[in-house]
Image (spheres, rainbow, N blue to C red):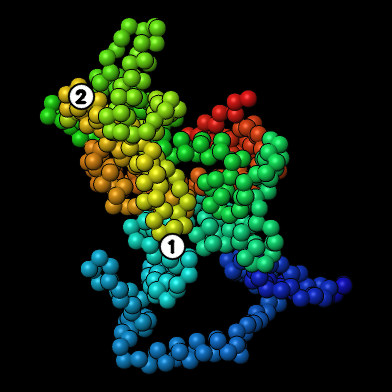
Amino acid sequence: MPGAFRLPCYLAPFVNVPDFSEGVQCQLLSTWQTNKHVMVAIDQGLLTIFIKIKAHRGDPLNEQADRWADGGRQSKIIQWSLPTNRPIFYWTNKDTTHQSPMNPTVKKRIDHQVSLQQLKTQKGSTANFLTREDNSRDLLGKFHKDRSVWIRARRRVLQCLSYQFPCALQLKQWGILKDVKCLLCEKYYRERNISEPPDSIKSVGHIQCYCPALQLPRIAIHHGIWRELMFSIRKSSTKLNDASEPRWHFPSALSPEAHAEWGLYKILEYMGLHEILPPGAGKNRVKLRKDIEEYHIAYAIDFDDSVIDTFIARRLDGLAFDKEQKLCVLMEYTRAMDTAEDWAERKEQEKNDRYGPLIGFINHLSHQEKSGCKAFQTNFTTGVRGSLHTNQFLTRLESLGVKNSNTREAIRNRTVQKTLSMSDMILKFFFIALNSKTDWTLQNLPTEIVNKNMERFNLHLQPPRM
Ligand SMILES: [Zn+2]
């Protein structure tokens, strides 16, 4: 429109843009950008009009908040800063009293206090999960604030913590879905022609810990977390023995990328409990079988050939030896669903039941040979949603020679962060697997996961054996 003056119009973001008449230029800008543009416009002599939009005027809750603020201002207990005349806030942290007018720290403290007070009044599953003591809850916030973690991963962790992850079970509870069956299981069993698959409910726990189609990435993730944890223990186990040598040896922790899984035969050999016969003719194997049989008979434990086969075939996640004290520690790692209150205790019991006979046998043999060796078991158990028994974990690290308390804390921190990242990866794998063949391998995964995350987390997936 010739002759009309140019009227610049700048709006803060999130404001609806009305239908402006011709000749008006309109842009959505941030406050900072607005200031800059306004200054330029004024310099150019353009007519510049500021319009204040009273967005909250008349809103009942806003009016109420204003009345409370007015009331608060009259309170006698408030102290005011001079000369800025702002209220001063007080708080105590680790027996030290701090004071300050409103600033980002005060805001954070207020948010924190409000959350803590709210949490006390809540009785739901999320509140129950978050208030569970001695479960490394302090590290959840750290993960959430970690800007190096993808925002979507952090959101998914929040969804899982607050029982809002859109798995079939949840969607059914919300009335969105009727069927709670796992589609991946259905696909998996159909591809294998298994006509009556076991009932599988698609819940977060099923995806994380049980869905058979995800076994391969689950094993890779298990090893990924464990290798790093075991290697950290080995690296940080600095306790010395009487001869001023490192007290503990970790023969299964090879590097953050690799570990060895020792079987019974190798353990006995290392401990000098098994006479090494010249190779050939399977004499070593025959001797070991005989020893195991004798152990079962001596303790009146039922057994058959398959029991002995399982005994010999067992592979330990990790081992620690103290040669001077003649101690052998069988280390086991588990990543479990942490919904039930006794999630870790149940898993540890399972692990103890599984390896108890093996320990019994080693100790029996040691007693027989009068070697003075003693075997026992130490479990490390992390929860899918970042749970980890703080005190128990730190004590176990200490018992394996990790002397420095800061190092123990750092290992705990890293283990939880890694478990959370890995759990998120399983959720991603689930949806990838839904859209591809269930026999997928590393090659079927998006290159971004393979290149970045696999290397970052020391994961080395093996293609399935055909
Ligand atoms: Zn499934």
Front residue of 278 and 258: 278
Marks 2 and 1 in Cβ contact (< 8 Å): no
- Is residue 250 in sight in this rendering? no
Element under disc 1 = helix
Where residue 234 appears, as percent x and y from the top left, is 31, 33
Tag 1 residue: 129
* Residue located farthest toward the left when viewing the structure as drawn: 242
Where residue 1 appears, as percent x and y from the top left, is 87, 72
Q: Is residue 418 above or below residue 263?
A: below
- Tell me if 434 is positioned left or right of 157 in this view: right
Tag 2 residue: 368
Q: Label 1 CB, ligand 1: below 8 Å?
A: no
Q: What residue type is labelled 2?
A: Gln
Q: Quadrant of residue 33?
A: bottom right
Q: Which residue is drawn at 57% across and 48% down?
A: 207
Q: What residue type is labelled 1?
A: Phe
